[in-house]
Image: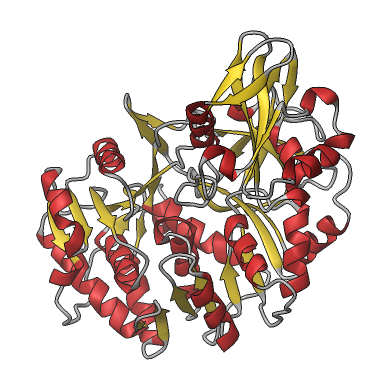
Amino acid sequence: MSDPTFETIPWGRDLAARAAQFGPGLAVHDGAGSITYAELTGRGGRLAHMLRERGAAHGMPVASALPNGIPAVWTAAAMRAAGVAEVALNAHQTDAERQHCLALSGARLVVTEAAQAAAFREAGCEVLTVEDVPDDPAPLDDLPPVPAGAWGRISFTSGTTGKPKAIVTTHGARWIGNLLQRASFAAMPTTESRVLLMTPFVHGAGILTMAFHDRGAGVVLLNGVDVPVVLRVLDEGGVDFVFAPPTVLAKLCAALEGRTLPGLKTIFTGTAPLLPALYHRARAIFGPVIRVTYGKSEINNPIAALSPAETDAWYAEPGAGDGVCVGFPGTGVEIEIRDEDNHTLPAGEVGEVHLRGRHMACGHIDADGFHPLPPDGFHATGDLGRIDPRGRLHLVGRLADVIKSGGYKVHPDEIEHALAPTAPFVSVLSLPSEYWGEVIIAVAETTDAGWPERARAALGDLARHKHPRALLTMPDLALTELPRNAQGKIMRRLIREQVLATHTLIDGPYPKLEAR
């Protein structure tokens, strides 16, 4: 007999219950205006009914393309309540990126703002703008529960090594992931809490919004990292949680250098390894409140997490071994480290990270169609890692980024770790070489002409075969900053393209770069 508990997800009733519980409380403030729980739920209910009236069935792909702001939040709530597969598009995509994502997902109905409506209509989509959604509320608890196995969200990988893949998550997995997100909090939000979010809502900010709203907390959702605005929000008080990936955290630390800003309960960070130099700068300003987490598009956070206390203890003395610690597996998450022959490796050995969880994606879509998870249910992440004696996961790098130079395998993250104290951000990558296979270079996000000298000194403890053959700064590449994707990850692929556009590699036993 099947277990009816998980056959359906009552999204509409859940949202209606939160409105009844927290109705007049602040749900979202976006810097321009605010909305209460009752208003957000009523507006989301109206859009959910409009989607159903347009034929949007459970599991049907429906796209949203909205910048950070109040409409993005009630649109996401409407998508869940209507039971559709929310195709989360970044509002700042190029035409080509938009076309690629629409083609993979098969979405033909789009919720967006009036300013973008024409572009989607030209792409052959039916458009519903947020400006067209009436203010009069509609109930959510009369919408039917959604089959747990129906497609609930289609998100996209970061595209750091190529075109993004579409990741498919069911409604049941989204519901479980939201419970596990809240369960992993070291400090639990209350109705008095406020979380500051600045990164795209379609990524981690949206996941945190769901979890905080279940506790009746308020969300301050800014459209990007405008440092003066962020500092004003922090100085005004009231915010006790912040989501700041390393790129955002570095900007805040630069602006707050020499100050202390106590009072935060937790700074959530993730999307990229948090290097020790940045951790110590942040700790001096905010205190020991940083929580490290590891997440992927293929499985909602948390895959692994390190509480603020555990984080502070690890960065006080990182310890022996490769990589950066990202914590203990989340509830229900299985992590295996496997070798090239798919054999599970013992603790301490480095291999590819494989994951399995109750809240992970059911498969992915690429140009060849939908690919379900393999029979064992594990996802091969492409990340290199190891498990330490306490059972914590340490990330060493990306399998695709491993550099093979002169017969050696080199992890660029190890070199970046050594160079981290010398510049705000450093990216290590390679160029193809007939003589060496690959030639290692390092690029720093700085205009300081003295950086190469400091970098050479910092590399002193690394073996010679790991030393970059070229050390470049932003003026060398005609850039003002390193290229990043929407999640804030530095894009090695785009940096490599810029290096090749501005320089020529003189190959041979003593390779060097010459400016064009």
103, above or below 281, in the image: above
- From the viewer's perspective, tell me whether residue 486 is left or right of residue 324: left
62, above or below 212, in the image: above
Q: Give the number of callouts.
A: 0
Rendering quarter of residue 51: bottom left
Give the x, y percent position of residue 248.
Answer: 57, 61
Residue 465 or residue 169, whichever sits in front? 465
Q: Residue at x 73, y 79 (%)?
A: 260
- From the viewer's perspective, tell me whether residue 459 is left or right of residue 373: right
Q: Residue furthest bottom?
A: 24
- From the viewer's perspective, tell me whether residue 279 is left or right of residue 53: right
Q: How is the image coloured?
A: secondary structure
Q: Residue at x 56, y 61 (%)?
A: 181
Rendering quarter of residue 513: top right
Residue 239 or residue 21, whichever sits in front? 239
Give the x, y percent position of residue 14.
Answer: 37, 72
Residue 82 or residue 279, whichever sits in front? 279
Give the x, y percent position of residue 19.
Answer: 35, 82
- Can residue 162 be seen here? yes
Q: Residue at x 75, y 37 (%)?
A: 414
- Can residue 336 be seen here? no
Give the x, y percent position of residue 387.
Answer: 77, 40
- From the viewer's perspective, tell me whether residue 429 is left or right of residue 112: right
